[in-house]
Amino acid sequence: MADDATPLLSRRDGAVLTLTLNRPQALNSFDGALHEALLGALKAAAGDAGVRCVVITGAGRGFCAGQDLSDPAIAPDLTPGAAPKNIGKLIEERYKPLALAIHHFPVPVIAAVNGVAAGAGANLALNCDIVLAAKSASFIQAFSKIGLIPDCGGSWLLPRLVGRANAMALALLGEKCSAEEAQRIGLIWRCVADDALATETLALAARLAALPSKALAETRRAFDNADRMGLDGALSLEADVQRRLGMSHDYLEGVSAFFAKRAPVFKDR
C-alpha cells in the first residue's frame, strides 16, 4: 500500500476501479493535492474503456470530512485588515469540476461511506449514483456552523433526495445524520454492517460493471432532465434515448442473450 503522503490510492479489480481518499490523519478532508489526484484519476478512468464501475471510499475511520480548513486556499488570514479568502474561486476551480465529473461519468460511481462524511465530503458521496454506508457512518451538512451554505452540489442534491423539509433541517441545523436514518429518509440507498461494507460494495460494483454502461449513464441523465420537464418532455426524451440505445451493440446483445437463455456480454460504454 502507498504511504500516507499519497493523497489517493487506486486499486483495480477487473472492470472495477476503487479510489480511496488517503488523508486519514485529517479524516480525508480535501486539500489541493487530494482534489488534483481525485479529479485526475476520474478523468483517466473516464477515458479507460476497461473501467465499467468506479468506487470512491476513504482510508481509516472517515470517508471525507469535507474541506480542510487549514488549506491555504480557504484558511482565513486573521490579521486585522487582511483581505478575505475568495471561497467562490475555490468552488469554481475545485468542487464544481469534481461534482460535474462524477455526475456526468460514463459508468456508474458508487460511494462506499466507511465513516463520517461531513460538509463537501457528504455531498461528494451524494453526487455518486449509489451510496452504501457502514452502519457506524454518519452524514453532516456542517456548513451553517461556519457561516456557509451546502456546496459540492449540496444545494441541488439535498432537496431532490429527501424533499425540502428534510433538506432544510439537515442544512440549517447541521446535525449528525446516522447511516440508518440516512437510509430511512432516502438520503442514501443502503447501510450495511461495518464488516460487510467492502464485500457488499465490491459485489454491487461487479454487478453494475456487468450491465450495459450506456443505458445506466442514460438513466441517470434521464432522471436529471426529468426534474426540469413535464411528462410530455420526459416521454420525448425517452423516445430519443431509446432510439439511440436501440441501435447499440448492447441492446442487440441483450435481446440475443434473452432468447438464447444465456448471460449477456455487454461491451458498449
Image: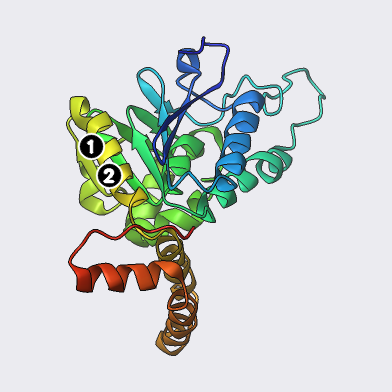
Question: In the image, what residue type sits under mark 1?
Answer: Glu
Label 2 Cα neighbours within 10 Å, binned few <14 / some 14-19 / many ≥20: some
The answer to whether any part of residue 218 appears in the image is yes
Locate residue 104: give its quadrant.
Answer: bottom right
Q: Secondary structure at mark 1?
A: helix
In the picture, measured across the screen, residue 13 lies left or right of residue 248, that is: left
Q: How is the image coloured?
A: rainbow
Question: In the image, what residue type sits under mark 2?
Answer: Leu
Quadrant position of the N terminus in the picture? top left
Residue ID for mark 1: 200
Which one is in front, 218 or 122? 218
* Residue 14 place in picture, x, y as percent: 39, 37
Question: Do the residues bearing badges 2 and 1 touch, measured as CB atoms within 8 Å?
Answer: yes
The answer to whether any part of residue 175 appears in the image is no
Q: How many marks?
A: 2
Residue ID for mark 2: 204
